[in-house]
Image: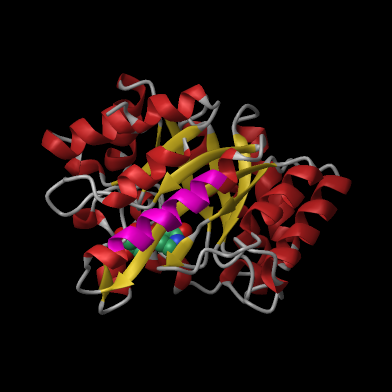
């Protein structure tokens, strides 16, 4: 079969996967390098990973993934700079003034984006800023800095690497709904204020048979605002055990998502959140669910793999 990355390139698209640095060897490394044109570190660039103790940094897994990507002529999507989760305990347990929080965040963004300047195609600068009802999520950042933390973070990231594309990323924003409309209104207002925002990331952690019917329409409305769109964390989980009926539905779901992106010029990247069921966050996060990726635990391509290929 033609590798997915070659099929995607022929359509002007990028196909990516989240990866775990320590696994980039053997069959896992062969497939990650051969099939995908973009890598996202699944955890390696999160604040809690890179600065577990204040002022003491661990860039080893992040650096390994960036080096692997360069050796395989792949893009890297940096993930993620500003989030409510997977922060170091010294940060979350501290009691900070608003001014201190602002300078902590500015330094974090400057340090991390600056370190990989020129090597990251796109950053998920802000991750998961919204509640389901479209209000801002109460987080360390929102509570301490107000909604302006989003514009500040984008501005600081742009200063540290003016060539990186800067994204806001969230889940349950794939279809046209209250939450995606809040994201739409935010991006529109940031653009009007001249804040450097280049794209929106639709995570797309989907449930079998539930690809939103308005996915392509939603991608198109963001494109029409003048930003790029990426599907950043695609997986399609099913109640276990998998069977051939479910795997066929899953293939159709992957086809629908990739086809929706392929149909919109400004949808630039589809990234799966792990390419093998042996490296998926689903079973531990959604008990009873799994088999959410295009390859099984033994690296055999599933119908979902062919479902992706079919839309490219
Ligand atoms: C997940 C990782 O895959 C897991 O290994 C980790 O334990 C928790 O985070 N949305 C995101 C990703 O933006 O960073 C999350 O990744 C999955 C949900």
Q: Quadrant of the N terminus?
A: top left
Q: Position of residue 51 (x, y in %)?
A: 38, 52
> Over which residues does the magenta segment extend?
247-259
Q: Please identify the quarter of the rendering in which residue 293 is found.
A: bottom left
Whether residue 258 is in magenta: the answer is: yes
**Tally of numbered discs:** 0
Residue at (25%, 79%) from the top-left corner?
288
Up-down: is 208 above or below 127? below
Residue at (51%, 57%) from the top-left corner?
203
Q: Position of residue 190 (x, y in %)?
A: 80, 51
Depth check, front residue: 102 or 170: 170
Most common SS among magenta residues: helix
Q: Please identify the quarter of the rendering in which residue 163 is found.
A: top right
Residue at (21%, 67%) from the top-left corner?
243
Up-down: is 116 above or below 288? above
Asked whether residue 63 is in view, the answer is yes
Whether residue 239 is in magenta: the answer is: no
Q: Please identify the quarter of the rendering in which residue 246 is found.
A: bottom left
Asked whether residue 281 is in view, the answer is no
Up-down: is 25 above or below 58? above
Depth check, front residue: 187 or 36: 36
Residue 243 located left or right of residue 170: left
Q: Position of residue 79 (x, y in %)?
A: 46, 48
């Amino acid at each position: 079969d033609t590798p997915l990355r070659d099929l995607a390139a022929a359509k002007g698209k990028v196909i990516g996967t989240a990866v775990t640095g320590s696994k980039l060897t053997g069959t896992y490394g062969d497939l990650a390098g051969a099939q995908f044109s973009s890598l996202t570190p699944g955890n390696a660039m999160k604040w809690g990973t890179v600065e577990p103790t204040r002022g003491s940094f661990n860039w080893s897994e992040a650096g390994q993934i960036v080096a692997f990507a360069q050796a395989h002529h792949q893009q890297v999507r940096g993930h993620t700079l500003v989030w409510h989760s997977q922060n170091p305990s010294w940060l979350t347990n501290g009691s900070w003034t608003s001014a201190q929080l602002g300078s902590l965040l500015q330094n974090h963004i400057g340090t991390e984006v600056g370190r990989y300047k020129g090597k990251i195609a796109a950053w998920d600068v802000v991750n998961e800023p919204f509640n389901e009802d479209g209000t801002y999520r109460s987080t360390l950042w929102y509570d301490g800095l107000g909604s302006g933390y989003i514009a500040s973070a984008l501005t600081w990231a742009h200063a540290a690497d003016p060539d990186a594309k800067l994204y806001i990323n969230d889940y349950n924003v794939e279809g046209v709904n209250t939450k995606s409309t809040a994201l739409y209104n935010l991006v529109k207002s940031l653009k009007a204020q001249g804040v450097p925002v280049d794209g929106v990331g639709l995570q797309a952690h989907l449930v079998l048979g539930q690809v939103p019917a308005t996915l392509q329409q939603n991608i198109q409305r963001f494109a029409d605002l003048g930003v790029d769109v990426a599907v950043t964390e695609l997986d399609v989980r099913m109640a276990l055990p998998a069977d051939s009926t479910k795997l066929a539905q899953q293939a159709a779901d992957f086809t629908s998502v990739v086809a929706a992106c392929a149909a919109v010029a400004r949808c630039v990247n589809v990234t799966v959140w792990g390419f093998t069921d042996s490296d998926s966050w689903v079973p531990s996060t959604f008990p009873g669910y799994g088999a959410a990726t295009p390859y099984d635990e033994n690296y055999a391509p599933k119908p979902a793999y062919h479902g992706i290929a079919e839309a490219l």
